[in-house]
């Protein structure tokens, strides 16, 4: 028979054990790079989250960007086949299908050669964790396309050094099975007023900004995206409507599409897709299987 003092020890020991469990390091996340063709990198857990279905538009639905589409597709296909390829910076106006093209090209490569290419998205704020991510990708045996959307750097942001080390390769060298694609609204990845400010306040203006500006030079390919013409915009809208079976008289479709772009203040792939969503909802057409 337990004494009173022994009975009192039970709850205390349970509390101590619970506290020790909370203090113990969290279990290391298991990264199975054979489990999917797309992942999102979570730096805080060092975990690659598998994405079973990628939110993307089919490559054939992207209009008005034929030249950059062909260049990116060719570069990616060479990489997926085990040959040399360049890191790519896709830069230009908002809503011009930069990120849509990256995801569409990944889908097209895997459609023709299933499982040949892994897409790994890394968020802008997780750039400092790039060296850790590369240690996860280096031994995996699959060709990995590392993708960072809307990349840019502020004046006091030093995380670009991690990216520069990856692009330059460092001592180890960039893994042969990893290629980096990034999108940005800025060709030099930093705002023009920041460049001018550093030049005006530095003792040696040229050297003051060279390190940051030269970051974009480390991408082997620059692909520029510009605002589309009215004809290209209408071609995008008509392509979406044809693909999803949205039926409307051509003159009415053009009139409404142009009115929509006027209210948005721009013509772009994003605006064309937003108009298509509005039109489909209004006409009771379900958009599925993008």
Image: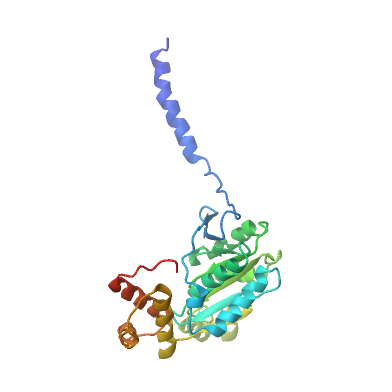
Residue located at (58% from left, 67% from top): 111
Can the viewer see residue 210? no
Q: Is residue 8 above or below residue 125?
A: above
Pick the front one: 283 or 179: 283
Q: Is residue 178 above or below residue 193?
A: above
Q: Which coloring applies here? A: rainbow
Outermost residue to the top:
1
Residue 95 in the image: x percent, y percent? 43, 78
Pick the front one: 108 or 140: 108
Residue located at (63% from left, 77% from top): 74
Pick the front one: 251 or 13: 251
Q: Is residue 259 left or right of residue 108?
A: left
Outermost residue to the left:
282
Pick the front one: 34 or 113: 113
Residue 77 in the image: x percent, y percent? 64, 72
Residue located at (60% from left, 81% from top): 71
Can the viewer see residue 242? yes
Location of the N terminus by quadrant is top left
Residue 156 in the image: x percent, y percent? 49, 72
Location of the C terminus by quadrant is bottom left
Residue 55 in the image: x percent, y percent? 46, 66
Q: Is residue 235 left or right of residue 187?
A: left
Residue located at (42% from left, 22% from top): 10
Q: Is residue 280 above or below residue 121?
A: below
How many labels sit on residues?
A: 0
């Amino acid at each position: 028979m337990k004494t009173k003092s022994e009975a009192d020890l039970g709850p205390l020991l349970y509390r101590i054990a619970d506290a020790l469990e909370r203090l113990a390091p969290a279990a290391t996340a298991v990264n199975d790079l054979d489990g999917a063709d797309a992942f999102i990198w979570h730096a805080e857990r060092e975990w690659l989250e598998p994405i079973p279905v990628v939110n993307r538009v089919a490559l054939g639905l992207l209009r008005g960007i034929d030249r950059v589409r062909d260049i990116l597709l060719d570069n990616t296909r060479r990489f997926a086949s085990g040959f040399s390829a360049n890191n790519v910076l896709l830069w230009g106006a908002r809503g011009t299908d930069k990120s849509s093209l990256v995801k569409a090209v990944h889908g097209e490569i895997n459609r023709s050669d299933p499982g040949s290419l892994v897409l790994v998205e890394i968020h802008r704020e997780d750039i400092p964790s790039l060296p850790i991510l590369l240690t996860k990708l280096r031994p995996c045996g699959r060709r990995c396309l590392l993708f960072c959307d809307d990349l840019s750097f502020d004046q006091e942001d030093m995380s670009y050094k991690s990216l520069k080390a990856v692009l330059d390769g460092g001592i180890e060298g960039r893994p042969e099975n990893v290629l980096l694609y990034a999108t940005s609204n800025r060709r030099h990845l930093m705002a023009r007023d920041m460049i001018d400010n550093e030049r005006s306040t530095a003792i040696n203006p040229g050297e003051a900004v060279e390190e940051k500006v030269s970051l974009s030079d480390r991408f082997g390919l620059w692909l520029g995206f510009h605002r589309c013409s009215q004809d290209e915009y209408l071609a995008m809208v008509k392509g979406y409507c044809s693909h999803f079976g949205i039926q409307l008289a051509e003159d009415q479709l053009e009139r409404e599409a142009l009115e929509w772009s006027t209210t948005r203040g721009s013509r772009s792939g994003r605006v064309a897709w937003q108009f298509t969503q509005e039109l489909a909802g209004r006409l009771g057409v379900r958009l599925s299987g993008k």
